[in-house]
Image (cartoon, grey):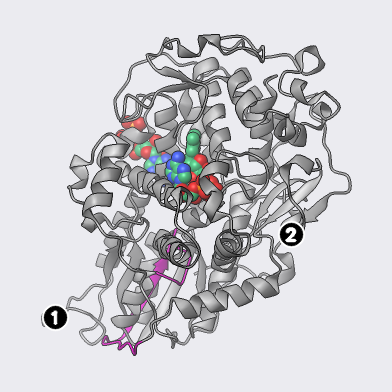
Amino acid sequence: MCNMAILPSSSLLSLSQRKLIYPSSIFACSTQIRFQLGFQIMTSTSKCEPKSVASSTVYEVPGLDSHEMDSIAEKTFARYSSKTELKRNGKGISIVWYRNDLRVLDNEALFKAWVSSEAILPVYCIDPRLFETTYYFGLPKTGALRAQFIIECLADLKKNLMKKGLDLLIQHGKPEDILPSLAKAFGAHTVYAHKETCSEELQVERLVVRGLRRVVLSPAQGNSTNSSSTNNPKLELIWGSTMYHLDDLPFSVSSLPDVYTQFRKSVEAKCTIRGCIRHPKSLGPPPNIDDWGSIPSIEQLGLHLEKATKGMLFLGGETAALSRVTEYFWKKDLLKTYKETRNGMLGPDYSTKFSPWFASGSLSPRLIYEEVKRYEKERQANDSTYWVLFELIWRDYFRFLSIKYGNSLFHLGGPRKVEQGWSQEQKLFESWRNGCTGYPLIDANMKELSTTGFMSNRGRQIVCSFLVRDMGIDWRMGAEWFETCLLDYDPCSNYGNWTYGAGVGNDPREDRYFSIPKQAQTYDPEGEYVAYWLPELVALPTEKRNFPGKSYIEQVVPLKFGNTNRHHNQSMARRSKFGGRQFGAQRR
Ligand SMILES: Cc1cc2nc3c(=O)[nH]c(=O)nc-3n(C[C@H](O)[C@H](O)[C@H](O)COP(=O)(O)OP(=O)(O)OC[C@H]3O[C@@H](n4cnc5c(N)ncnc54)[C@H](O)[C@@H]3O)c2cc1C
Ligand SMILES: Nc1ncnc2c1ncn2[C@@H]1O[C@H](COP(=O)(O)OP(=O)(O)OP(=O)(O)O)[C@@H](O)[C@H]1O
């Protein structure tokens, strides 16, 4: 085992200190104005109306102080703990292998480990493969912003496990090396973990199983019911990443409908969502361990973050996740207007911002389901309260699709094996990645992504369409850049949405062109969003900010359909050359 020095809490960067650093060449955009003077942190007590947003505003998400967050977490833990006496009936030690499920609440792997043992050893492996490069284009596999977010998740998980009478063992290395050696050292009979669905993660699962097979436990340590003396620890994988459970689907996953609406209608009519797993008050004791390892700093991971001066700053961990739920649903009472605001781009409150915590597993979608139902009972039920669940069904759908379509999700032709010519022109791609295309709406979104690790759903659809349709660039380059940057990176949702956006997804009807002039007019009519990210546009009249002409950098490519004139809208009904429709407005 190789442990790194214990991280002093002061070395966890405070929210307002973060900014992703990339090699300077990536940001070789001469017109970029760095606006780093006198920024202001917005918290829940600040007025954060998008219209009055200053270019230097930093929004903490959630916008609550740590005292309030701790109190929210404590109350939520109490609400989601078991009200009845629960009994554990196992023997020996079991291991919980934490992966993308960095939470205590509604964690079935943790619960099963508790039931089946006398002591649980929770472990997280800092897998060096996560800090290598993306598959095709050699970009950083995990950017510094997401790495920092995960570091915070781990620190918070450790704290919450300790409150439950446990701890978190941090190990540096590959799970297939670490878990068998821990199972051997502790005589653990079972390793519990949440099941993943994409090939990189599945390969690790296979290697862990292989490693565990080589460990021989004594009959007293094992979980085998037969009398054989060759008793290996087992890997027990549990489904826990979706709102609808895989086993509850009304069809086998290989027969998953290729049209989302069919999937949604079918699960809504035929399935129920399971209640959250409720834990006992204490999950202890943990096994006796002298050195629980240390959470690495961002520098120890070989990455670097610069102090952030604008945009949203997310705090990792279950405590922050539960606090954001309380803030968005209960404190700010925003759930009731979600459907009207969800296509926004500026500020923390137009949408839930739950995705980074879903991706790290700090937040369970079933808990959100229960909270939506509670809100509907205690406050009101309307289209907006339903719509959050509607979007979560999309998330489920992409997860199930990743099982049905396997690696084709990552291949150029996608699940439909579409044959089409794509460009890999580096210069064009870099102008997109760096936010130097000459189209303010694209540039602002791309700068938001690299600065904060987040981009709105609206923005993601627009920049995806621009890259694949207007530039004709290989969509996997865009998907891999998202993989590097996104705090909420999830292979299923990311590659699923990219294949849809590129027109190679399983549903041929989801093949759409987003007209930038039309999108700008509809979603940023006064140029507030672009002016926030591109301060050089602030001085322009509001109606010119998205259409700055010569006062902004030159456009790197013409638009495929229509010009950049803001009155452009006549040609919207034309069919695209890709066979797809051109969309000026909302996707769904
Ligand atoms: C090209 C592209 C790439 C994307 N990559 C990712 C990704 O890697 N990880 C990720 O979580 N989402 C991804 N999305 C989906 C979506 O943009 C984000 O989930 C959403 O913007 C997160 O913000 P929010 O939590 O405020 O969402 P809200 O609007 O508040 O929605 C609530 C939740 O519903 C789910 N959801 C909403 N829209 C989608 C969607 N289109 N697909 C899947 N789930 C959805 C998310 O879990 C989200 O947190 C991508 C979308 C596009 C177009
Ligand atoms: N979690 C993940 N995140 C990103 N990419 C993933 C993930 N899991 C699997 N992939 C991608 O799945 C693909 C698997 O490729 P691999 O070579 O193993 O299988 P394949 O189907 O034979 O592909 P190919 O024919 O392109 O070589 C790669 O593109 C890999 O990046």
Please name the amino acid that badge 1 sits on. Answer: Thr
Residue in view at x 62 percent, y 31 percent: 523
Residue 426: x and y in percent read: 59, 20
Please name the amino acid that badge 2 sits on. Answer: Thr
Is 403 in the magenta? no
Q: Earlier in the sequence, mark 2 or mark 1?
A: 2
Tell me if 534 is positioned left or right of 373 in this view.
right
Tell me if 70 is positioned left or right of 366 in this view.
right
Q: CA distance from mark 2 to mark 1?
A: 56 Å
Question: Badge 1 is on which residue?
Answer: 225
Residue 184: x and y in percent read: 34, 76
Q: Magenta: predominant secondary structure element?
A: loop
Q: Is mark 2 within 8 Å of ligand 1?
A: no
Residue in view at x 79 percent, y 12 percent: 550
Is 89 in the magenta? yes
Residue 534: x and y in percent read: 77, 31
Give the magenta part as a residue range. 84-106
Q: Which mark is residue 307?
A: none
